[in-house]
């Protein structure tokens, strides 16, 4: 019996060290060498080196001078510890009421514009960092008015910020909200509060 148990124990120890220790360390090391930014969380930093967010995790922007993300159902909004969808079905009155409220807010700034779906619907994670170019363009007038600039300048920056489909096939064109808002602050500084 010892002749059968010993190889089993040796194999368990060997495979544990190989697949549970050596392989994860090798993959982590390779990722850090080859894809340092992505392996570190795709963090975005300001001019002083302070981390302002991640290109992969959405954050809430509510001020009129910023591009707003799609709605979030994660906790109280953009809470990574409560990442999830709302689980509200299409016939749920709570969902219908929330969407009506979101549409009413958008209509204040763009009364006759077509409203893209991602402007009023949440994602599965509630933490999407990107919106559709149509959603971004819908907000150009509000952003321009709040910053006192020409809407064409905001539209041009939106066009320059669009990420195309991967390899021309995968995904949809999109605008990263945090990256766009950082570019917006860099090119058109925020209005300073009066008083």
Image (tube, grey):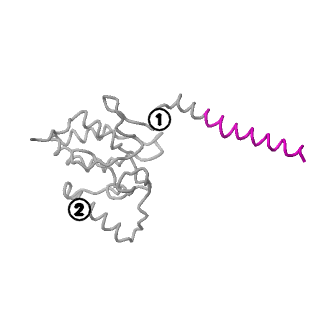
Observer-nearest residue: 81 or 123?
Answer: 81
Q: State the predominant SS element of the stretch in magenta.
A: helix
From the image, state whether disc 2 or disc 1 is nearer to you: 1
Observer-nearest residue: 25 or 160?
Answer: 25
* Residue 45 drawn at (x, y percent): 35, 33
Taking the view exactly as shown, the residue that stands out farthest to the front is 2
From the viewer's perspective, is 83 left or right of 154?
right
From the viewer's perspective, is 154 left or right of 193?
right
Observer-nearest residue: 165 or 30?
Answer: 30
| Residue density around tag 1, few if under 14, some if 14–19, many if 20 or more, within 10 Å | few
Residue at mark 2 to residue at mark 1: CA–CA distance: 39 Å
From the viewer's perspective, is 142 left or right of 83?
left
Residue 20 in magenta?
A: yes
Residue 18 in magenta?
A: yes
| Residue density around tag 2, few if under 14, some if 14–19, many if 20 or more, within 10 Å | few
Observer-nearest residue: 159 or 44?
Answer: 44
Q: Residue at x 30, y 67 (%)?
A: 97
Q: Residue at x 45, y 47 (%)?
A: 171
Specify the quadrant of the image occupied by residue 188: top left
Which element type, helix, strand or loop, lies under badge 1?
Answer: loop
Mark 2 or 1 closer to N-term? 1
Taking the view exactly as shown, the residue that stands out farthest to the left is 195
Q: How many marks?
A: 2
Q: Is residue 51 above or below residue 171?
A: above
**Residue at the spot of label 2:** 104
Per the rendering, the mark at residue 40 is: 1
Quadrant of the rendering where the C terminus is positioned: top left
Per the rendering, the mark at residue 122 is: none
* Residue 154 drawn at (x, y percent): 23, 41
Which element type, helix, strand or loop, lies under badge 2?
Answer: helix
- Residue interval drawn in magenta: 1-26
* Residue 190 drawn at (x, y percent): 20, 38
């Amino acid at each position: 019996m010892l002749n059968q148990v010993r190889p089993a124990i040796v194999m368990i120890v060997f495979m544990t060290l190989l697949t549970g220790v050596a392989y994860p360390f090798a993959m982590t090391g390779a990722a850090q060498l080859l894809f340092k930014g992505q392996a570190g969380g795709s963090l975005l930093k300001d001019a002083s080196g302070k981390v302002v967010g991640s290109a992969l995790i959405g954050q809430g922007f509510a001020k009129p001078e910023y591009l707003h993300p799609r709605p979030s159902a994660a906790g109280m909004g953009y809470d990574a510890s409560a990442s999830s969808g709302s689980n509200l079905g299409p016939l749920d009155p709570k969902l219908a009421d929330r969407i009506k409220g979101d549409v009413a807010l958008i209509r204040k700034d763009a009364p006759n514009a077509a409203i893209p779906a991602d402007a009023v619907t949440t994602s599965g994670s509630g933490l999407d960092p990107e919106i559709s170019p149509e959603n971004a363009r819908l907000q150009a007038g509000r952003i321009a008015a709040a910053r006192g600039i020409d809407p064409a300048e905001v539209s041009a920056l939106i066009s320059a910020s669009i990420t195309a489909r991967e390899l021309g096939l995968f995904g949809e064109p999109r605008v990263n909200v945090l990256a766009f808002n950082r570019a917006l602050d860099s090119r058109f500084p925020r209005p300073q509060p009066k008083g």
